[in-house]
Image (cartoon, rainbow, N blue to C red):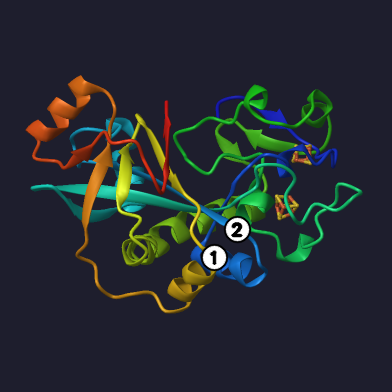
Amino acid sequence: MTDNLRFGCTGCGKCCIGHHVPLTLDEARRWAADAGQVIVLIEAFVTDGPGMPPEQREHVLRRSHPVQCGEAEARVSVTFAAFNPGRCRNLDDNDLCSIYEQRPLVCRIYPVEINPHIPLRPENKDCPPEAWQQGPELIHGTQLVDAGLEALVQASRQADRDDIAAKVAVCQALGMTTSALKGNGFTAYLPDMGVFAAALEQVPSDDSAPWTLHVEDEALVASLQGYGLGTTSEPPLYYAFIGF
Ligand code: SF4
Ligand code: SF4
């Protein structure tokens, strides 16, 4: 965030179409209880090694959890997100949110970026040009002007840190233990929501499942195996690999 920006939501509803909305653990519980589908997105890196962006060291370490991967330790970042391949199930016929007062944190924060290392650029957002030509000042210099909005961003970052161990435990309990290498892609799972909801209600305590990295590039496989990391290039059967 480097330029002064003003912003006024036009209510166009575009941010509610075709976006998987990251959820806190509590929000994922509510989404599941409301019969919504959650998509699980996973990426991993090695501390000061493969996949870790050095300039984001503190940020990525805080929102990740150590796991065993082959003979080495990797750190896994897990996103539980509302699965919205089309219109969000809560977007009504008038393009209004039907759970507005209870909508997820990320919906309240949009279009502001949650990752402190990603600058807010209007061209990367769904909001129409006029949204950036109206409303109060959103960003002054590098600071969010609205203290309430800043508090929501901080709450979202804190939830990422507070929830990561439980999210990893849920993944392990459900056998979602193949990750992509951060920067190389994500693995994506669509868990059975009955099983997923049960695991969310009673987060398993076993934290010892082995993990594998899904990597398709042969040179990268060789490099990661040199670190002692466990890898697979097999076509995925129960997850999708979304490569960059
Ligand atoms: S929950 Fe509401 S605000 Fe969030 S994506 Fe769905 S319709 Fe939009
Ligand atoms: S895309 Fe932007 S302008 Fe449109 S509803 Fe979402 S936040 Fe508002």
Position of residue 215 measured from the top left corner of the image (x, y, whole percent): 28, 32
Question: 232 or 151, which lies in front?
Answer: 232
User: Which label is found at residue 234?
Assistant: none
**Ligand 2 falls in which quarter?**
top right
Position of residue 142 measured from the top left corner of the image (x, y, whole percent): 55, 33
Position of residue 156 measured from the top left corner of the image (x, y, whole percent): 52, 55
Tell me if label 2 and label 1 are in contact, CB under 8 Å. Answer: yes
Question: 10 or 19, which lies in front?
Answer: 19
Give the residue at x 44% y 56%.
Answer: 160
Give the CA distance from mark 2 to mark 1: 7 Å
Position of residue 165 measured from the top left corner of the image (x, y, whole percent): 33, 63
Q: Is residue 31 above or below residue 156?
A: below
First in sequence: mark 2 vs mark 1 = 2
Label 1 C-beta lies within 8 Å of the nearest ligand 1 atom: no
Question: 204 or 103, which lies in front?
Answer: 204
Q: Secondary structure at mark 1?
A: helix
Q: Is residue 189 above or below residue 222?
A: below
Disc 2 crowd, CA 10 A, few/some/many (<14, 14-19, 20+): many
Give the residue at x 24% y 67%.
Answer: 207
Disc 1 crowd, CA 10 A, few/some/many (<14, 14-19, 20+): some
Give the residue at x 62% y 65%.
Answer: 31
Q: For this view, does 94 lie left or right of residue 218?
A: right
Residue underneath mark 1: 193
Q: Is residue 135 above or below residue 36?
A: above
Q: Amino acid at mark 1?
A: Met
Q: Amino acid at mark 2?
A: Gln
Residue underneath mark 2: 37
Give the residue at x 42% y 25%.
Answer: 244
Residue farthest along the bottom direction in this orientation:
202
Q: For this view, does 209 lie left or right of residue 150?
A: left
**Which quarter of the picture shows residue 128?**
top right
